[in-house]
Each structure stands twice: as structure tokens, then as C-alpha cells.
Image: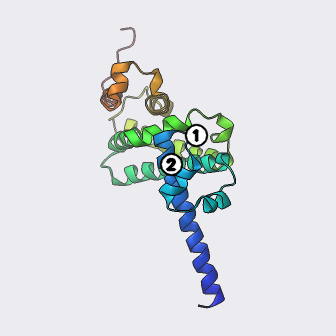
Amino acid sequence: MQSSTWRSYVRADARRNLGKIVEAAAEVVAERGVNAPMEAIAKRAGVGIGTLYRRFPDRAALIAAVGDHYIHTMAEALDAAAGSSADAWSAIWDFVCWVAEPGRAALSTALAVLPEEAIVDRAEFARVRAGWVERFAGLVRQAQAEGSMRPDVGVEDLIHLLNVFTCHPEQLPAPVAADPGRYLRLMLDGMKSGAATPSGA
């Protein structure tokens, strides 16, 4: 094998290992929290512990990568919902329900215990999040222009809703926490056009 081809192979293999580690870490963190054993993450990824530490010198670096992976995944899911749904409201509905799926919400809950500077304030996370929020806001404006979403709801309302249901389930009453998807869908229904309470009621 020529040296240039070999180097390309090695780089591709390294990228595959990196992706496997980050995806495995996301799964394990969702299941066991941000203090999950590094050995468990390496085992889930199918790599040796030495390989893991060569890519991520400490837990903080790995968890930061999980945060970046998470926000990239959300941005991709939003784009996919917008591209495959019949209208803006359907895209919003599909995306919100996707974010709140149990395994994905568990990862949000695990990451939410970290200080903001560990993930949220990092440049890559902040950059992707800003773009994701703007595209989400565009869907809200489009749904309102189409007449399917009440005009007094903003993208911030949807983000607050997701934060409560996915990042801070401990704040939910026990019956809601037992079946959060049902209550999330009920609250989404309240955002549809025509659901607004008349002023002064």
C-alpha cells in the first residue's frame, strides 16, 4: 500500500474511532450520567481504554465532545423534520417529539447538571445552537404565517418547554414525569392556531 494511501486509511480509521467513542459516550452518559466510568464508554465503543484517552485526555474533554455531538444531532434532526414534513407546524411537532424521546431526553437531563461553561459556553456548541435556534424560529414564523400556529407563541416558549421536559424532569409533578410525552403533546396542542385564550378572560 502506498504511503499516501496508508495515511488516508489511518486518518479514516481514526475518524471512525472518534465517532464511535463519542456516540458510545452519549449512550452511556444517557444511561449512567456524566460520571459514568470511562471504561464502560470504551467498552461500548469497542476500543481500548488507551485509545479513548489518546483521543480525550480527560472526562471533561469527552463530555464536551458529547455536548457538541448532541447539538449537532439536534440541528440535523430539525433540518430533517423541516425537509420531510408537509408544513411548518408538522415539522415543529415532529421535531419537538423527537427531542423528547426517552433516550434522547435522558442525555439532555444528564448534560443539564453540568455548569454552562462546560458545554453551553463553548464556541462550537454556541455556534451550532445559534444556527439551530434561528432555523427553529423561522419554522415558528412560517407556521404562524400559514395560520397553523397561534401568533402569541415564540421560539423561546418552545425552547423553555423542551428545557423543562427534557433537561429538568425533576421539576415535573410525578404524574407528568411518568408520561411526559402525553403532556408535552397536550401543551403543543395549546400552541395551535385558535387555542389562545381571549384577552381579559
Could you say which is closer to the camera, residue 24 or residue 157?
24
SS state under label 2: helix
Q: Nearer the viewer, residue 136 or 196?
A: 136
Q: CA distance from mark 2 to mark 1?
A: 12 Å
Quarter where residue 84 is shown: bottom left
- Residue lying at the far top in this picture: please name it: 200
Q: Quadrant of residue 117?
A: top right
Using the image, tell me which numbered label, if any, was put on residue 26. Answer: 2
The amino acid at mark 2 is Ala
Q: Viewed as shown, does residue 166 lie left or right of 61? A: left
Amino acid under disc 1: Asn
- Residue drawn at x 65%, y 35% as measured from the top left: 116
Give the residue at x 56% y 52%.
39
Residue 136 in view in this figure: yes
| Residue that numbered label 1 is attached to | 35
Q: Position of residue 127 (x, y in %)?
A: 63, 48
| Colour mode of the rendering | rainbow
